Amino acid sequence: MSTIVTGASGTTYITGTGSSDFDYAALIEEAVEVKMATAYLIDDQIDVLESKVTGYEEMLTDLTAVSDAAEALSAQSDDSIFDSRSAYLSSSAISEPDNVLGVTVTDDAALGVYTIEVISLATSHKVAADVVADETAALGYEGTFSLSEAGGTATAISVTSDMTLEDVAEAINEVSDATGVTATLVKSSDSGYTLVLASVDTGQSITATDDTGTVLMDLGVLASDSSFANQLQAASDAELTIDGVTVTSSSNDIEDVLSGVSISLYDDSAGSTITLEVGQDLDSVYDAVEALVDAYNTYRAFALTNQETDSDGAVEDAVLFGDSVLRSANTALYGVLGASVEVDGETYTLSSMGITYADDNTLEIDEDVLEEFLIQHADVVEAFFQQSTSVSSSDLYVGDIAGDMAAGEYAIEVTVDESTGEITSATIDGVALTVSNQTLTGADGSAYEGLRLVYTGDASSSITLTVEAGFADRMVAALEGYIDSDSGLVANRISTAEDTIDSKQDKRDRIAARAEDYEDYLVTYYAKLQAAMEASEIALAQIESLFNTSDD
């Protein structure tokens, strides 16, 4: 019988040709498996921990998405969605006012309503030459001429006798960037083509002169008195009225006609007016609310997966089943979702705006209700989602609030010099404010950076500033302790699990290394045993041969 056993290192072999029935390989394998049993248990534990890490990472991603969506609606946002502006056009006489003019606004534009009448559009200057029967035939004209529009650079264009009407048009267009004049060939009849010159810019007239020869006159562009022989359209400025004030422009694209408002004219509406309302960009607000609902529903689906068991009570997919951090985060979210906010003495909840719970506790939006609520009560929506303030004295005006100021009451102390009436100092909860005339601001780097107050009183005063957190601010605050990348509860769970995985992996590696050493020891041991048994068999065969017997 021949037996071969290979150790863990792959370098030791046992070979034999004796009659032993021992299966050394099986013996060694079984002994090593006993040593590895603990390592295999650790493998299972690591698999569970890695599943938990994956679950925590998904939880962190989903909660962060909810927080980010809420922050976009909160006072903490650098660019408040409620400060976005949009233009709305309407007219009782014009069915589609956006075919008459287009309006773009920046977030700096002031809210307001304006009445606009477009009297006329700005036009470019256009002149025509005489009809030419064949645009590809040599004209036989020689000389130079110069073209430019007002503001352009007069440029000389040379014409030789072999040039065609197409060649002349091409020569004009090659320098149009400088001159501001373009040339177009128009098939004006079945038997002729007309060269048309046009100013690139509206409101700008073309200047044309023959420098040498009479090419422009020969083409029929200029009359004998050097005026244009056939003017198709004179250059003119656009004219419109805004709230009765006449506005003229050489262009149909009028920038900053009102601060932050630009208007593009497409058609005239003489005799009919269009109403322009510069208001909040309600579409963006709607999208931001929808994004918050979608982000919450994504997290809710994750939470449901990790709370459910199958029909046998197994929790194979619920890798965070019973996890305390998951339960805590759910409680924090539900606490905010069920909260109410008081605005101008009236209490509002999400359902006031058409956002309600479905059977599985996901959120649903009634589009019609939310859109109508935004149109009718945009100020309430803003006050609902963002923090609001109130003061105990009419002498104090709140200009801007620090985005991360916690809800609560703050003591404002203002000291005024009685002889001069000037503010000498001011504090908020004992922290000094920067004073500039009547304006009080939070110092850079302080907890109140971004705070701007205006005090109009003429005497020292103690005033209470009350900050009430809005729905979105509450949501951000509720999730902060979970999603912080350094000290958040979820991040800590991930870090702890990963540390445990590393520790268990080290232990598993040590067990495997000892098992490998043990395997090598057994291979060597059985190799020696096999060698000894083979030597005995050889000795026995020799003795039997000497005595010529097979008896014991």
Image (cartoon, rainbow, N blue to C red):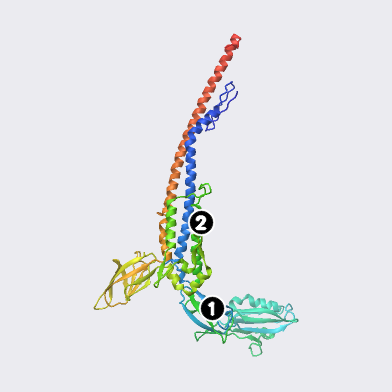
Furthest residue toward bottom:
225
Specify the quadrant that holds the N terminus.
Answer: top right
Element under disc 2: helix
For badge 1, the amino acid type reads Leu
The image quarter containing residue 14 is: top right
The image quarter containing residue 415 is: bottom left
- Mark drawn on residue 158: none
The picture places residue 87, in percent across and down from the top left corner, at 51, 76
Element under disc 1: strand
The answer to whether any part of residue 409 appears in the image is yes
Dot 1 alpha-carbon crowd within 10 angstroms: few under 14, some 14 to 19, many 20 or more = some
What separation in Å lies between label 2 and label 1 (alpha carbons)?
Answer: 41 Å
The picture places residue 144, in percent across and down from the top left corner, at 65, 81
The residue at which mark 1 appears reads as 89
| Residue 384 or residue 169, whichever sits in front | 384
| Residue 24 or residue 482, whichever sits in front | 482
State whether residue 283 is above or below residue 360: below
Residue 136 located left or right of residue 479: right
Q: Residue at x 39, y 72 (%)?
A: 345
For badge 2, the amino acid type reads Ala
| Residue 195 or residue 189, whichever sits in front | 189
Q: Tag count in the figure? A: 2
The picture places residue 385, in percent across and down from the top left corner, at 43, 67
The residue at which mark 2 appears reads as 301
| Residue 339 or residue 411, whichever sits in front | 339
Furthest residue toward left:
419
State whether residue 151 is above or below residue 318: below
Q: Residue at x 49, y 35 (%)?
A: 36
